[in-house]
Image (cartoon, rainbow, N blue to C red):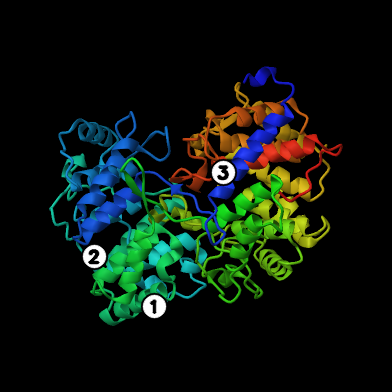
Amino acid sequence: MDGLALAFIARDRLDDFVVGVRDGLKALQRPDGHWRFELEADATIPSEYILLLHYLAEPNPSVEAAVGRYLRDLQGEHGGWPLFDGGAFDISASVKAYYALKVIGDDPQAPHMVRARQVILAHGGAARANVLTRYLLALFGQIPWRGVPVMMAEVMLLPRWFPFHLSKMSYWSRAVIVPLLIITALKPLARNPRGVGIRELFVTEPERERRYNRNPTGTLIGDLLLFANNVARLIDHVVPGVVRRHAMRRCLDWVTARLNGEDGLGAIYPAMANAVIAFDALGFSRDDPAVVTARRALEALLVAREDGSLYCQPCVSPVWDTGLALHALLEAGEPGDGACVRGGLDWLADRQILDRVGDWADALAAPVRPGGWAFQYNNDHYPDVDDTAMVGMALHRADPVRYHTAIARAAEWIVGMQSKNGGWGAYDADNTHHYLNHIPFADHGALLDPPTADVTARCLGFLAQLGFGRDHPTMQAGIDYLLREQEADGSWFGRWGANYVYGTWSVLTALNAAGLDLSSPEIRRAVDWLVSRQRPDGGWGEDCTSYWPGREDASSVSTPSQTAWAVLGLMAAGEADHDATRRGVAFLESHPRTGPRLDEDRFTGVGFPRVFYLKYHGYAAFFPLWAVARYRTLMTKNDRRVAWGL
């Protein structure tokens, strides 16, 4: 369909689309009421999984063959491996993928291995990989331990007021670092039963390389912290044994208290894998209950595909997927008291975290009762603010009476988690100790969890939907934060979705729900920005490289997810009748579809900007259904205003 010439979309075509996607999505609901789609990342996690098996001397030929197929399929035209579909070469992902393929038996002289080796060497070799990759190489004896920053177990003994303290980092950093402290104290060596190394990936012999650790920010404070790291290396060798053992016990106690059953430490792969290695380094037997539990958590992340390939997810997203699916179905007219929606809502309500005070409480000036939801099946120490707002809105929209208590507890927790600047982070309040991003370990730039526009928007939308007025102190502080965060071009940054389209949609829906005048300059500038970013085919496509400075305008092919966000944003701004909105809906309605999912290969989710990206396989179903169904509803009303917080 020619989006440029479109003036009207026939109602029956909208109906066919909505019914088809809605029914397809309903068919994927699991018997207990929830939805879960694949959550795919780059080559990093599958490569690490293979290397973990060889660290433990547990090679698995069938798994290796399937993961090898997956990794070869991901190799880019540049010869290496990217962070997202169609992305540029990334040295860290490429070093891990090359090593994993070599470990499972790929011939280093095979064309794909030669190409990979050449591009890795052209970019400085494996010594230039990021910190977490170098820790893995140190475990396999490929670089000396001086090739990684010093991480002393004694940090567990530091007082809370000390500048470097676990409570000052993000949840994911804590979950990854604490077992890593055990690992770096013991410095174990991988069993590596096939004795595979990758010395051919180094420009300078690993033992002679002197510039492994670098200043991640190039600033004076970064230089000072790099010097402090070198001093810590000297201290590390003279720590009394009794102190080291006490510190390691604190690390182990911390990990075991948060092992989180078969959902794993932090419910994220890197933390789970580090826990397994830490247990192994401490001499735990393979049948120890903690080890068995940790291993099962890892195995649960494996996804076997119909083409015979296999990969390992970074985590799973059932709460997020279920919340989004319910919003889309409710928008499509599915009754809130029907079996489908009721089943999903009851499943969510049962998973609200009401009796676990997690790490999030450490930063709060006043105690707050728990009331949030995790992103995964279970992760009680780390409820997710974004998920909580999303789920709370779905519960309230479908049945505010039945779920009154759950909604009230969620709102209480959300209000208590607001940061001092008016915004919300994903897991912690006031996680803004930005000086920590200068330490050598933080070369990934994702050590913290500061407030962001997209999460803040979700929280405001939830509270507005509950009836919080603009004059409420929580609302006013949040609105002020969002208005301060607007970019010069009228957009908003998207932390957890790619990128400015996601952020702008999120904020526009929140400002609409909060009752801001849709003719205000801020909203008009955002509308103009969205319209300016529409592509000739009627869709929107923002490349993940837009997170790099100077590349903010990077565009890509139009994607259903991003197009739906833009359309939802325009409708929230009162532009349901805009030609750009109609063209966007036409793009979605006519896009090729397999089951409920519109065909979408590109990554539109984000783990850590510039470091780790995600492909939510459900996004190409949830958001297009949501957008087209809302458009259909608004076109039948005299009042084009959106009624909900999202």
User: How far apart are the two marked residues, 1 and 3, measured between alpha carbons?
Assistant: 46 Å
The residue type indicated by label 3 comes to Gly
| Residue matched to label 1 | 253
| Residue matched to label 2 | 187
Percent coordinates x, y for residue 567 in the rendering:
68, 35
User: How far apart are the two marked residues, 3 and 2, measured between alpha carbons?
Assistant: 51 Å
Mark 3 neighbour density, 10 Å: few (under 14) some (14–19) many (20 or more): some
Judge by depth and name the residue closer to the eye, 115 or 267: 267
Residue 230: name its quadrant.
Answer: bottom left
Judge by depth and name the residue closer to the eye, 487 or 355: 355
Look at 85% across and 39% down and name the residue there.
639
Where residue 5 is drawn, which disc sits there? none
| Residue matched to label 3 | 24
Q: Find numbered disc 1 in the image and state the secondary structure of the residue it sits on.
A: helix
Q: Find numbered disc 3 in the image and state the secondary structure of the residue it sits on.
A: helix
Which quarter of the image is occupied by the N terminus?
A: top right
Mark 2 neighbour density, 10 Å: few (under 14) some (14–19) many (20 or more): some
Q: Earlier in the sequence, mark 1 or mark 2?
A: 2
The outermost residue toward the top is 5
The residue type indicated by label 1 comes to Asp
User: How far apart are the two marked residues, 1 and 2, measured between alpha carbons?
Assistant: 19 Å
- Front: mark 1 or 3: 3
